[in-house]
């Protein structure tokens, strides 16, 4: 019998890849999603990769009765991975209440319901956004967090605090994964990022520009104090990021964690500039991008990348996908979308 793992937001970009990796590692993922930022086609893609059905519950996980119903319908859930959240930084500035409600209510409800069913392990999707503009690079897990610059970022900091307080008071064993910038798609090109509307993130904007959906890519800022003046980020292949969740879940279920709450950066440990990403994409795709060098985007962090040592030494987790491989997979996915 496979061990059941509840995956909230399991139809989303990262969640769908994690569902595949969990199943391939021998777990039984159970998807909860309300499709507020995803499509049912993602679940079809997961099932096509796995060649089997995956239980899906279309509910808002901030709905306590509905969430309780899922735990009742799926006895024996051993752990939870909580991806479900709104994630658009700009939108969170326009609609702070929607972000605080969705991102915090969903967590609070989950934490209220889990003990009713004896579920004692949770992996949470945090973000490098908690570090703000760091004073020193690379950032380690001990790098101080800074006051969030957006309501979205604030929800991640608050969620980390809530999980820490609840764990200290007898709540679940917790792993906080601070993701850097996930990119790319499953090598099968059956699942990938499905941005609704105009993409805010770099890589989907690049692939849509190459596909002719967008006229040009604007590079936001070329006067930063970085090797070529454009911003530096730590781009992690989404399949690698998905695998980090399998390792984290296993550690929690095997009760190997050193502390009730553990925090890990999940990045490659390398920084790449926007212009390097553009150049690498052009090389792997053979597509010439229409690129405009533009002004800075308000709120952007000039440079951030992970010190990935803790995840490697403690979790035994190391990324494998290169920037070129990740970008090639993103292009393959864009072409599979056929639009
Ligand atoms: P996504 O929007 O593709 O996936 C989130 C999924 O959760 C979507 O399928 C959405 O429909 C669902 N959802 C949202 N609110 C829900 C609710 N109340 N009930 C049920 N389902 C709900 O986003 P993603 O990129 O896969 O991100 C997953 C998680 O990782 C999020 O918590 C996000 O904040 C975090 N994160 C993402 C990034 C990134 O760059 N993509 C970086 C750091 C952290
Ligand atoms: C990457 C780089 C842009 C688009 C955001 C969130 C963060 C985390 C990841 C969730 C930046 C540049 C982008 C474009 C560009 N999410 N860029 N032209 O800003 O690192 O992080 O997503 O937790 O919280 O803030 O990601 O993909 O938007 O940008 O030049 O059209 O690409 O300036 O340097 P970012 P991104």
Image (cartoon, grey):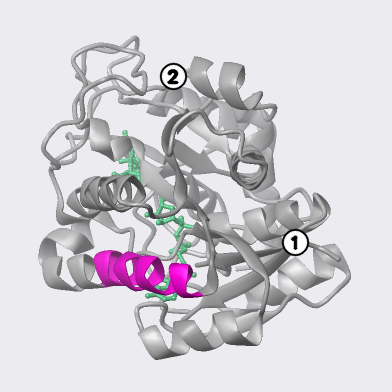
Question: Quick check: is 111 in the magenta stretch?
Answer: yes
Question: Quick check: is 330 in the magenta stretch?
Answer: no
The mark found on residue 271 in the picture is: 2
**x, y percentage for residue 325?**
69, 33
The mark found on residue 3 in the picture is: 1
The part of the chain drawn in magenta is 102-116
Q: CA distance from mark 1 to mark 2?
A: 37 Å
State how many labels appear. Answer: 2
Residue 276 visible within the image: yes
**x, y percentage for residue 96?**
13, 65
Residue 278 visible within the image: no
Mark 1: give few (<14), some (14-19) or many (20+) Cα within 10 Å. some
Q: Who's the residue at 41% across and 44% down the image?
A: 202
Residue 45, compared with residue 90, is above or below; it is below
Specify whether 23 is left or right of 234: right
**x, y percentage for residue 1?**
86, 66
Q: Who's the residue at 39% across and 22% down the image?
A: 305
Please identify the quarter of the rendering in which residue 245 is found. top right
Magenta-colored segment: predominant secondary structure = helix
């Amino acid at each position: 019998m496979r061990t059941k793992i509840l995956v909230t937001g399991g139809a989303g970009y990262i969640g769908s890849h994690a569902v595949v990796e969990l199943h391939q590692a021998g777990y039984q993922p159970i998807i909860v999603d309300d499709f507020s930022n995803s499509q049912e086609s993602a679940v079809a893609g997961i099932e096509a990769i796995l060649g089997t059905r995956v239980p899906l519950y279309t509910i808002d996980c901030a709905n306590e009765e509905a969430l309780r119903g899922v735990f009742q319908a799926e006895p024996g859930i051993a752990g939870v991975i909580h991806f479900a959240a709104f994630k658009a930084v700009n939108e969170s500035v326009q609609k702070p209440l929607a972000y605080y409600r969705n991102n915090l209510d969903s967590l609070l409800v989950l934490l209220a319901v889990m003990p009713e069913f004896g579920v004692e392990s949770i992996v949470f999707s945090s973000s490098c956004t908690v570090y703000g503009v760091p004073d020193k690079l690379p950032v380690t897990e001990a790098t101080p967090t800074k006051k969030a610059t957006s309501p979205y970022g604030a929800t991640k900091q608050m969620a980390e605090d809530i999980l820490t307080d609840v764990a200290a008071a007898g709540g679940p064993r917790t792993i906080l994964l601070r993701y850097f910038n996930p990119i790319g798609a499953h090598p099968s090109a059956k699942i990938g990022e499905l941005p609704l509307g105009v993409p805010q993130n770099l890589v989907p904007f690049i692939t849509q520009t190459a596909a002719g959906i967008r006229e040009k890519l604007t590079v936001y800022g070329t006067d930063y104090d970085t090797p070529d003046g454009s911003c530096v980020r730590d781009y992690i292949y989404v399949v690698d990021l998905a695998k980090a969740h399998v390792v984290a879940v296993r550690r929690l279920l095997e009760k190997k964690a050193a502390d009730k709450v553990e925090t890990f950066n999940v990045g490659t440990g390398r920084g790449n500039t926007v212009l390097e990403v553009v150049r690498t994409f052009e090389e792997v795709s053979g597509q010439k991008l229409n690129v405009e060098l533009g002004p800075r985007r308000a709120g952007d962090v000039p440079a951030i990348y992970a010190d990935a040592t803790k995840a490697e030494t403690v979790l035994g987790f190391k990324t494998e996908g290169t920037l070129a491989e990740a970008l090639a997979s993103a292009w393959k996915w864009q072409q599979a979308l056929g639009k």
